[in-house]
Amino acid sequence: MGLMHQEFPNSPLVDIVVLIAGDTSMQAVADAFQMDGGTALHDGATTCPSDVNLVVLTVGTNAFPSYYASPTFPTYVTDVLNDTNAVFKERTSAAPNNATIADYDLENAVIDAVQYYNWRDSATKSIIVFGNQWPDGGGPTKPQTASTAGATAIANAKAKGITLYAYLTPPASSITLDATVLAEYQALATGVSDKTTVDMSKLSADDVKTAIVKILQTDICASTPSTGTQTGGTSCGTVCDSFSSILCTINLLACALNKAMDACCPGAGANTGCDCGCTKTMPPPLNTVSKPAEMIGALGVLPKQH
């Protein structure tokens, strides 16, 4: 099971749910999250400061028990969130279904994730889907009678402000996909916003890993303004927007220090007051404070403690 939290205090909240088709042909995707998911999460949250919750789960079969992408979303809800009353849309491998249908029941899994994941109220929310067959039960083409699961997934995600990303990855060598499969993944990705999918079906396993690292970083940065690597949660843009106020405060402090020097060194004649150049309240008259440290404290600057 992949439960990762990248904390970045005083930064925007970002919640990401990754759903991977549970077929063993999705091994390259599971490998990517196992080996590089944590690093990609850290780098993305640092480049675009954000407090990220990331959960990586499989759909259908628990195909990767020793990997991050394990177990299934229903197991996460019942065992981790302790919600034993959830009624899932996602189909299981038990009769009358089969493992293939369950492993590729991605659209119903999206419906469940929208409803049952523990989304944080103020977080930017997204669901990332990875599969290599038809996302509503598997297969190399759109079925003769397609369900409405895709349309429902899009509508429910949109209603909750959740962005969908959908990625088609390389199928098993014995399967040839037709264009309808990619079109369905594109429909999921573009149904909620202007996001587009990426056709990864022709990539090598190594290229899939590289692409997934970029996908995670892109998702995080799409949720927060990029400000370059920082050591705190305040963006450079915020500092620049506040620069005039900061400069004004510096000028006020300079005036206060000059007048403190006059008070401590009477007759020096060099500092007899100043124009601070802003509309903020001037420092209080000298007779209202007894020490330079108190004057600085009156301006909201704490004196240094010894």
Image: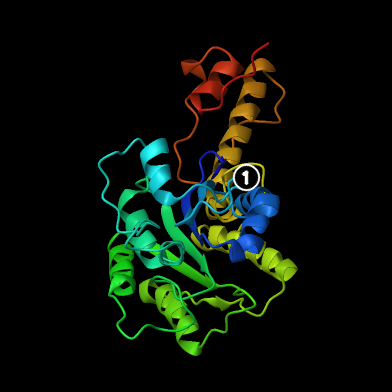
Q: Is residue 249 above or below residue 14?
A: above
Residue at screen point 40% across, 73% down = 193
Instruction: Please identify the residue farthest to the front as the structure is shown.
Output: 95
Residue at screen point 65% across, 77% down = 173
Q: Left or right: where does residue 304 sit relative to residue 279?
A: right
Residue 42's x, y, as percent? 65, 48
Image quarter hosting the C terminus = top right
Three-letter code, disc 1:
Ser
Residue 25's x, y, as percent? 60, 66
Q: Is residue 232 above or below residue 58?
A: above
Residue at screen point 51% across, 28% down = 299
Q: Left or right: where does residue 1 sit relative to residue 59?
A: right
Residue 246's x, y, as percent? 56, 44
Return the residue nearer the eye: 25 or 304: 25
Residue 225 shows in this picture? no
Residue 304's x, y, as percent? 64, 18
Answer few, some or many: residues within 10 Å of disc 1's Cα (few below 14, many 20 plus, some between 14 and 19).
few
Residue at screen point 54% across, 72% down = 132
Return the residue nearer the eye: 163 or 19: 19
Question: Which residue, given by chain and number where applicable, does mark 1 sit on?
Answer: 66
Q: Is residue 276 above or below residue 19?
A: above
Image quarter hosting the N terminus = top right
Q: Quadrant of residue 180?
A: bottom left
